[in-house]
Amino acid sequence: MSKSTFDRLAPFIREYIYRNKWEEIRDVQVAACDVIFNTENNLLLATGTASGKTEAAFLPVITKLYEKPSKSIGILYISPLKALINDQFQRIEELLEFANIPVFKWHGDVAQNKKAKLIKNPQGVLQTTPESLEAMLMLRTGDITNLFSDLRYVIVDEVHYFMSEDRGIQLQCILERIQRLTNNIPIRVGLSATLGEYESAEKWLNSGTRRECSTPKFDGGKRKIRLFLEHFSVENENNLQKDKFYEYLYKCTLGKKSIIFSNSRAEIEDNIAHIKKIAKKQQTADVYLVHHGNISSSLRQHAEESMKKSELPMVTGSTVTLELGIDLGELERIVQTGSPFSVSSFVQRLGRSGRRGNASEMWFVFKEDINRNDSEFYKTINWDFIMCIAIIQLYLEERWIEPINTNTLPYGLLYHQTMSFLVTSGDVSPALLAQTMLTLGAFKNISQSDFKLLLNYMIKMEQLEIDEQKKLIVGLRGERETNRFDFYAVFATENEFTVKFKTEEIGTIHKEYPVKTKFALAGYTWEVIEIDKKSQIIYVNKVEGISTNSWVNSGALALHTKILKKMKDVLCSDAEYKYLGENAKIRLQEIRAQFSKMNLRDEMVVCIERSTYGVFPFLGTKAINALSYALTYYGLNNNIYFDGVIPVCIIIKTNVNMDEIKRILCKIKISELDKTFFNVPQDAAISGKYNEFVPEVLLRKQYMEDYIDVEDMQNSL
């Protein structure tokens, strides 16, 4: 243990370390103390899961707060999840047990009397979400100075998540607006387990602070990893073959405290329902739970508590909701059905197991419906299976994690923050409004002319009005929008029905099922007995059997070109992968043979049938979009074939021959291309909650900037 670092910590923290029998202060904690104690820099802590990042952030900042108490809230901790706040709250409370520093939570589930206590006497540590901060800024503007005038530190957990989401842009804006109201710039600390490179995260963290960022580098040591991948083929809906898949899921989680990750809520419900059926038949304990965004918060919390505290080896099926760092205790195995969508997601999920020196263990299981009747060869290849191998290899061979996509022209968020600012400030001149909004770091790429276009459209949509002094105020329809509870959240929520069993809320579904319909939710099958259309409540009874459910899949996902290039390497290689099971080895050999037969090892363009050609460039989503538009620009009408989220190929139907297509591709690679001349549809737009309040010309511009990558296309073609 570093004696000098240990001695520098507050007495109650040293006592906490003794009480919990720490053998040493970890490298990440020593490095964080060095930055916080000796500089005024922002701090980025980018190390693996369970490396002690949270303690590394809190030990020095709490020490500093103890030594010089603040006159307001001293530390602001921001998390993407209420569950993560609740989890961290207990850890911080224990750390502060013998200090005179209170810790508060502030989110939708916290009682008003506790919030009032903080407003009356703001001090210590506050844990919250961006949405709750937004509501605080809009509804309690007069309290902001009192709450944050002497704020010393802002800790942003899961910083990689915020960087890639609209919520991260919202958070950047809120923090800067609070800084301006209080004339105080606190030090920011970012925590992340899955950053491929640090520069963009440092820039994100520094935005609006005029500070530098320190990012300590760590070796991390040799990480022990156990991987296994198996594949099950199902022909013609063969139930016996399907049963083998579910039996395998049952066996590989039996007696193991596990999470089964799947890429859709419907798949989770299906997997858990079948495993529960097998467990009942085998007379083993029902230890199976479900955790996703459509499950009620009480049932999600029950799953988290059961995973953490139950003596039984609990198994929970989940989407991304358990990907982030909620403490679930010692997980023995992670299982993934299908492929994760990114290397980052793979690393995050892998890191959920293998804490305290144990090996991280992750099993991948594929169920593929084989259709032997498909005439197009590329539709018979399991691209998801190949992508999974590519993702694993990119991490094993290079420890590569994709850079984070950030939105450079977030017009929808500019609408949202403009409305939020006007609610708090009243009437403002257009010039002052532009000066205020466009100097926020998140909007640095948006021009004054674009903002003027947006404001005029907002006036047309009656979101804004011009008063007698020629100042802008919130309009009549704008008031309806900003007065809605869900205005504080910048992510879209579907119109859903609440499902209730007697008085207990089970969760939500996206459509109204008729009476007597059966559906799956929270790991059980329910039958509709009554519908309250006015309140949008569906009352149900629990019934036996297995049923299905479906949810609307929102948002587009952009795959990185490096993943597609690695997929081609996997297809062209003869390499064997030690983690593949026997069925998986056979399926890989079959796919490689198909790929080789079409001569795609050496050729990019193949003839599919008369006057129909396939271009297989193995480009990421944004790059293949650019190629598709460029081909259209040169007279070759085409469409991209996606297998799920994977951009497989471009299909061209034309009377020109293959040599002419190749000539055009060569020209596209070397020409100076201006994507503003591409024939992009007028209504093209990246999905966004507030798109209806943004003119089409700006949405199209945003789409072209953030979803068409000419440079990557030309470099990678």
Image (cartoon, rainbow, N blue to C red):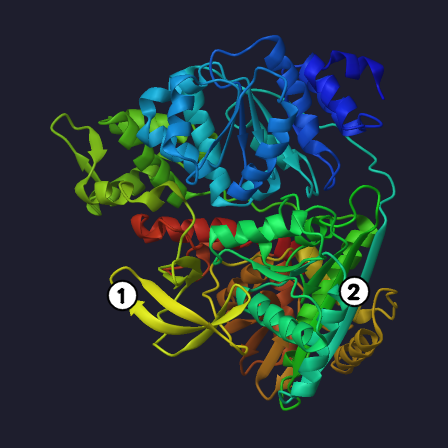
Does the residue at mark 1 contact the one at mark 2 (Cβ under 8 Å)?
no
The residue lying toward the viewer, choosing from 480 and 317, is 317
Q: Residue at x 27, y 65 (%)?
A: 533
Tell me if residue 245 comes above or below residue 268 in the rendering. below
Q: Which residue is mark 1?
A: 533
In this picture, residue 73 sits left or right of residue 627: left
**x, y percent for residue 115:** 40, 28
For the residues labelled 1 and 2, the Cα–Cα distance comes to 54 Å
The secondary structure type at the circle numbered 2 is: helix
Instruction: Tell me if I can see residue 444 in this picture.
Output: no
Quadrant for the C terminus, please: bottom right
Q: Quadrant of residue 495?
A: bottom left
In this picture, residue 509 sits left or right of residue 373: left
Q: Which residue is mark 2?
A: 569
Any mark on residue 374, and which?
A: none
**x, y percent for residue 386:** 73, 68
The residue lying toward the viewer, choosing from 281 and 445, is 281
Instruction: Tell me if I can see residue 195 in this picture.
Output: yes
In this picture, residue 534 sits left or right of residue 172: left
Q: Residue at x 45, y 65 (%)?
A: 552
Tell me if residue 490 comes above or below residue 291 in the rendering. above
In this picture, residue 47 sits left or right of residue 652: right
Quadrant for the N terminus, please: top right
The secondary structure type at the circle numbered 1 is: loop
Tell me if residue 565 comes above or below residue 18 in the rendering. below
Q: Residue at x 57, y 80 (%)?
A: 656
Q: Amino acid at mark 1?
A: Lys
| Farthest-out residue, left | 468
Please name which of the two marks, 1 or 2, marks the residue nearer to the observer: 1
**x, y percent for residue 713:** 62, 57
Q: Quadrant of residue 9?
A: top right
